[in-house]
Amino acid sequence: MTFESVPFDEALRLAVALAIGLLVGAERGWKGRELGEGRRVAGLRTFGLTGLLGGAAGLLAHDLGPLPIGLIFIGLAMLLAVAYARTTPLAPDANI
């Protein structure tokens, strides 16, 4: 796959989704900067990847219908639930 084979419109949409996720993650990280290490649940990387995943789901849904959005949502919800369950015994007052 070369750079010319990726449509600019789709790459731009993914870049915008990533940028929005990174902005939300940066704001969340800035807001929780006083919290100790291990107390911040989701930040720059988490929201950036979530935004990129949402953008990819939107592009896939354009071609394949709403099924990819539902599957990606279920997968992400399961991943977040497992991550929350793993951190809860360490920090009972952790928040999402």
Image: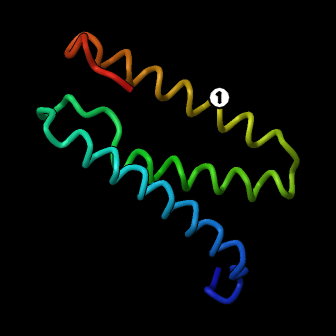
- Image side of residue 92 versus residue 80, left or right: left
Placement of 78 over or under 21, stated as above or below: above
Residue toward you, 30 or 87:
30
Q: Position of residue 6 (x, y in %)?
A: 69, 79
Asked whether, in this view, residue 17 is left or right of residue 24, the answer is right
Percent of width and height locating residue 26: 33, 54
Secondary structure type for disc 1: helix
Extreme residue toward the bottom, this view: 4
Q: Residue at x 25, y 49 (%)?
A: 30
Q: State whether residue 33 is above or below residue 91.
A: below
Coloration of the structure image: rainbow
Q: Quadrant of residue 12?
A: bottom right
Task: Look at label 1 and name its amino acid.
Answer: Ile
Residue 60 to residue 39: above or below: below
Task: Decide: is 23 above or below 68.
Answer: below
Query: Which residue position holds label 1?
Result: 74
**Residue 60 quadrant:** bottom right
The residue lying toward the viewer, choosing from 96 and 10, is: 96
Q: Residue furthest front?
A: 31
The quadrant of the image that shows the N terminus is: bottom right
Could you tell me which quadrant the C terminus lies in? top left
Residue 38, percent from left and from top? 18, 31
Residue found 57% across the figure and 60% down from its top:
17
What residue lies at 56% left-to-right and 33% top-to-bottom? 76
Circle 1 packing at 10 Å, graded few (<14), some (14-19), many (20+), is few
Q: Nearer the viewer, residue 25 or 80?
A: 25
Is residue 69 left or right of 26 when viewed as pictured?
A: right
Q: Residue at x 71, y 34 (%)?
A: 71
* Residue 44 position in % (x across, y down): 34, 51
Which quarter of the figure has residue 77?
top right
Q: How many marks?
A: 1
